[in-house]
Image (cartoon, grey):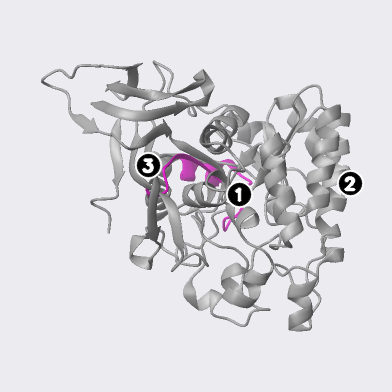
Amino acid sequence: MIIKGARVIDPANDIDATLDIRIRDGIIADVASGLTALDSEEVLNAEGLTAAPGLVDVHSHFRDPGQTHKETLHTGALAAAAGGYTSVICMANTLPAVDNIETLSDIIRRAHDEKIHIYQTAAVTRDRAGESLSDMEALKEAGAAGFTDDGSPIMDLSVVTSAMKEAARIDTILSFHEEDPAYVGIAGINEGAASGRLGIKGADRKAEYSMVERDLKLALDTGARIDIQHVSAKESVDLIREYKMKDRKGLIHAEATPHHFSLTEDAISAYGSLAKVNPPIRTEEDRLAIIRGLADGTLDLITTDHAPHAASEKGAALTEAPSGMTGLETALSLGITNLVKTDRLSLPALISLMSLNPARLYGLPAGTLSEGAPADIVLFDTDLEYTLTEDMLHSRSFNTPFIGKTLTGRVKYTISDGQIVFSSSSSH
């Protein structure tokens, strides 16, 4: 296949130019101008489109095994491809938790049947209970992409210290959900105007930044590489910036989600449980702090925290409904709409945050259009406005507040290992 005439953005090679891409045997064979197609080669006319390395999400929930009424490996893969993602790392909070080789190996085996690359983390602690470490070394050898108790903060200082020392020893990544339950009333709703309107105690920002500070200090002390997940509070951004200035080894990394840079706590009033997420969406001041953190490199990853739930579950009372929203299919559009079109980030910077940086952190064969790299490519129209409808979505769940919203920037094709795995013209 030859992709002709796209604006090619490849931050790994500092490329931003109109070029052609030749794909041969699932590998990028050439990136240049004026390539001539052979008779045997399919030509994909990409004039007016941008071609970039396939997106990489290092924070997704496919709910498989245990909650496949919400999502499966297959439906998650379909949603990822529709959003331009060719590589996804799934979290370990399945049922049972991925704290053993049997569960990990089963997921990895079944993931091979899908058309995108699905990687699986393992739990830091047994049953994600925060009390005793899993056999991290054996799980890494069995294929764990990293380690996380995501959804459950590790409160015991001795346990998290031991985990960081072990992670440093075996050279792996620890991802941390930072929310001290002592400062959380009703999770998923910001303690402030949002909780005040409801007459409840919500999740205070100190729940996050107190634990962020603890783990930033520990990372520098132990030499562990860490990923602070889904940052929501301006104090957390400030702490990460401060500690990154002390970090000479590249140990500290941090995520922002599209919902945290796109929405404020007012979304709870507008969308109810569809905007209920952990940690909660906070104030405009927090949103702008997150955007500044993305712009200056303090936050070096954009992740989706794709968290599907069934309609019946989200339809419960707001204080009882589970937290989380789907995100794989809207992330690129939200980045273009709320970061690029507002001149907060350049398009190459957005691609770095959504592809190159996460691939590099986790050592994945992705995030670049270098010759010889896997032909994982997303082609999208940066200027196309569309209104998101349920029938555009491929996830098994539809719990997103962005249905009915007009967004800018739509994925047209996703190519994984040289094969078209999503085309907007043929999607349902």
**Discs 3/1, front:** 3
At x 41%, y 52%, the residue is: 79
Residue under label 1: 92
Which one is earlier in the sequence, the residue at label 3 or at label 1? 1
Please name the residue that numbered disc 2 is placed on: 157
Using the image as rendered, state which of residue 34 and residue 147 is in the foreground: 34
Which region is colored magenta?
82-108
Residue 161, image x, y percentages: 85, 39
Residue 155 seen in this snapshot: no
> Badge 3 local density, few (<14 within 10 Å), some, or many (20+)?
many
Q: Amino acid at mark 2?
A: Leu
Q: For this view, does 305 lie left or right of residue 249?
A: left
The amino acid type of the residue labelled 3 equals Phe
Separation (CA) of disc 2 from disc 1: 21 Å
Question: Which label belongs to residue 380?
Answer: 3
Q: CA distance from mark 3 to mark 2?
A: 45 Å
Which of discs 3 and 2 lies nearer the camera? The answer is: 3
